Amino acid sequence: MAERPLEGRVTLVTGGSRGIGAAISQQLAAAGAKVGVNYTANREAADAVVAAITAAGGEAVAIHGDVSDPEAAGAMVDATEEAFGDDLWNLVANAGITRDNLISRITPEDWDRVIDVNLGGTFHVARAASRKMLRKKRGSIVTMSSVVGPPWQPGADELRGLEGWRDCADEGAGQRGWLARHSRQLRGTGLHLDRTHRRAQRRDPRHSARADTAWSPR
């Protein structure tokens, strides 16, 4: 029998309806998790992921919500728990967008949207989930950020030609600082914070990405 380390554990994956989020949702379901597949606009894509999971014998439900809205982020967590009739165990804060451009060309509106979704959205949904998890003294939150960052980071040479991804680099730097601070604050609480990142593929940065660092579910 295949190992299922997340058997029965309710898990929310933001941005889970396509790309890397869809792959994460399906892998977690294969490990036994009950998965809330979050989407913002494309219900058909979320339903397709749910259908693939259920066809493979897993449990999943589509969860609508925009992570950049604090109230919607909280409602997503509540809706996931209500759908499965159990408390949230894991959160994968995967939702993210890019408006890649040079600093001289990116608009303030595009900049604000990237920060609101990628950085603010991670905060909003993690805040809502952590309130549930801390009461139970257990849980795991994994954040996803852009691989584009400082030139001294491992693999930086591979990323030459993606200089326009500065908006993603800035939100990634914000996530690193945020995670470092809150990881220290949560020591001894039973709640674990981890971070991984998406590695961009040049042919289509919005849809072609892979998780570059593995994480271990708790």
Image (tube, rainbow, N blue to C red):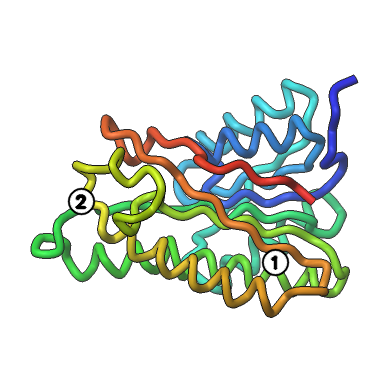
Amino acid found under the numbered disc labelled 2 = Glu
Image coordinates for residue 26, horizontal then vertical, percent: 65, 32
Q: What percent of the width, then of the height, locates residue 133?
A: 79, 67
Q: Residue furthest bottom?
A: 185
Q: Is residue 83 above or below residue 44?
A: below
In front of the other: 156 or 92: 156
Which residue appears at 67% of the width and 59% of the height? Answer: 141
- The foreground one among 40 and 5 is 5
Specify the quadrant that holds the N terminus. top right
* Near-viewer residue (23 or 51): 23
Q: Of circles 2 and 1, which is in front?
A: 2
- Residue position marked by numbered label 1 in the rendering: 129
* Residue lying at 57% horizontally and 69% vertically, measured from the top left: 179
Residue under label 2: 163
- Residue 190, located in which quarter of the rendered image? bottom right
Position in image of residue 52 (x %, y %): 65, 25
Image-based side of 68 in relation to 140, left or right: left
Q: Secondary structure at mark 2?
A: helix
Q: Are marks 2 and 1 in contact (CB under 8 Å)?
A: no
Relative to 216, does residue 55 appear above or below in the rendering? above
Residue 103 - label: none
Residue 120, image x, y percentages: 46, 70
Q: Residues within 10 Å of mark 1 (few under 14, many from 20)?
A: many
* Quarter of image, res 188: bottom right
- Density class for disc 2 (Cα within 10 Å; few <14, some 14-19, many ≥20) is some
